[in-house]
């Protein structure tokens, strides 16, 4: 799979912007996702994910955070996939994560989160019986405030060359985000 959702109806994939995060709130209304929500739901397993809290107006004024399940289990992020088939039979398989509003605990870092599914909901999410789309859609909500833990990490995570376990270690001297403090960042959505 290639990262970034490419709808099947696109004529030329080189001219169409890929969608990297799919907003749950508008998922059912957008023609781009209508078929995929019915028949091509998937899960992205992850041990953690990163989010940046913007603390100022300049690019370098962002603080990275690592978010993971408090219970130590793997995360299951809801997603959609699609296969684009070109006029000459070429195929491109793409996928993207679905996002939802942040919960009360994480809203101080960022206004959105990946839609995190619980193990008990995997079968419903992955069941592509079209009669159950509405039930599956209801799973796309913020996680409970006790599901995730998060902490600040260093800026090494911003460099693709850095692939060491140390980049996920918490910064000891960083102040935690305050839940009632609004993030000072723009939105990609």
Image (cartoon, rainbow, N blue to C red):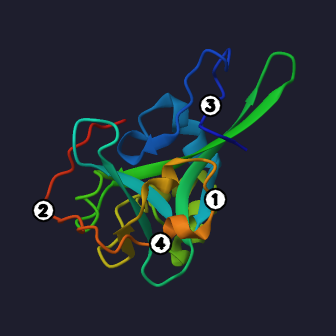
Residue contact between numbered discs 2 and 3, judged by CB atoms under 8 Å: no
Residue contact between numbered discs 1 and 2, judged by CB atoms under 8 Å: no
Disc on the earlier residue, 1 or 3: 3
Q: Nearer the viewer, residue 157 or 187?
A: 157
Location of residue 123 with respect to 93 vertically, above or below: below
**Residue furthest out toward the right:** 89
Disc on the earlier residue, 2 or 4: 4
> Which residue is located at x 67 percent, y 20 percent?
13
Give how far apart the Cα atoms at labels 1 and 4 are.
13 Å
Q: Name the residue that disc number 1 marks.
A: 163
Percent x, y for residue 28?
Answer: 44, 41
Q: Residues within 10 Å of mark 1 (few under 14, many from 20)?
A: few
Q: Nearer the viewer, mark 3 or mark 4?
A: 4
Percent x, y for residue 171?
Answer: 37, 70
Give how far apart the Cα atoms at labels 2 and 4 are.
25 Å
Residue 51: in sight, yes or no? yes
> Which residue is located at x 56 percent, y 66 percent?
124
**Residue furthest out toward the front:** 173
Q: Name the residue that disc number 3 marks.
A: 6
Q: Name the residue that disc number 4 marks.
A: 169
Q: Nearer the viewer, mark 2 or mark 4?
A: 4
Disc on the earlier residue, 1 or 4: 1
Residue contact between numbered discs 2 and 4, judged by CB atoms under 8 Å: no
> Which residue is located at x 66 percent, y 28 percent?
8
Disc on the earlier residue, 3 or 4: 3
For label 3, the SS is loop
Give how far apart the Cα atoms at labels 1 and 3 are.
28 Å
Residue contact between numbered discs 3 and 4, judged by CB atoms under 8 Å: no
> For residue 1, which quarter of the picture?
top right
Q: Residues within 10 Å of mark 3 (few under 14, many from 20)?
A: many
Residue 189: in sight, yes or no? no
């Amino acid at each position: 799979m290639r990262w970034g959702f490419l709808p099947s109806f696109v004529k030329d994939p080189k001219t169409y912007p890929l969608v990297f995060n799919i907003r749950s709130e508008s998922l059912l209304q957008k023609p781009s996702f209508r078929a995929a929500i019915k028949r091509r739901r998937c899960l992205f397993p992850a041990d953690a994910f990163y989010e940046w809290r913007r603390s100022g107006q300049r690019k370098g004024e962002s603080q990275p955070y690592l978010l993971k399940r408090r219970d130590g289990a793997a995360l299951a992020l809801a997603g959609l996939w699609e296969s684009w088939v070109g006029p000459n039979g070429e195929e491109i398989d793409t996928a993207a994560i679905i996002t939802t509003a942040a919960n009360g605990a994480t809203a101080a870092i960022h206004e959105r989160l990946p839609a995190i599914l619980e193990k008990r909901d995997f079968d419903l999410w992955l069941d592509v019986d079209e009669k159950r789309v509405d039930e599956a859609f209801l799973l796309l909500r913020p996680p409970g405030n006790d599901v995730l833990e998060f902490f600040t990490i260093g800026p090494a995570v911003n460099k693709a060359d850095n692939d060491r376990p140390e980049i996920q270690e918490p910064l000891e001297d960083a102040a935690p985000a305050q839940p009632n403090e609004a993030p000072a960042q723009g939105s990609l959505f």
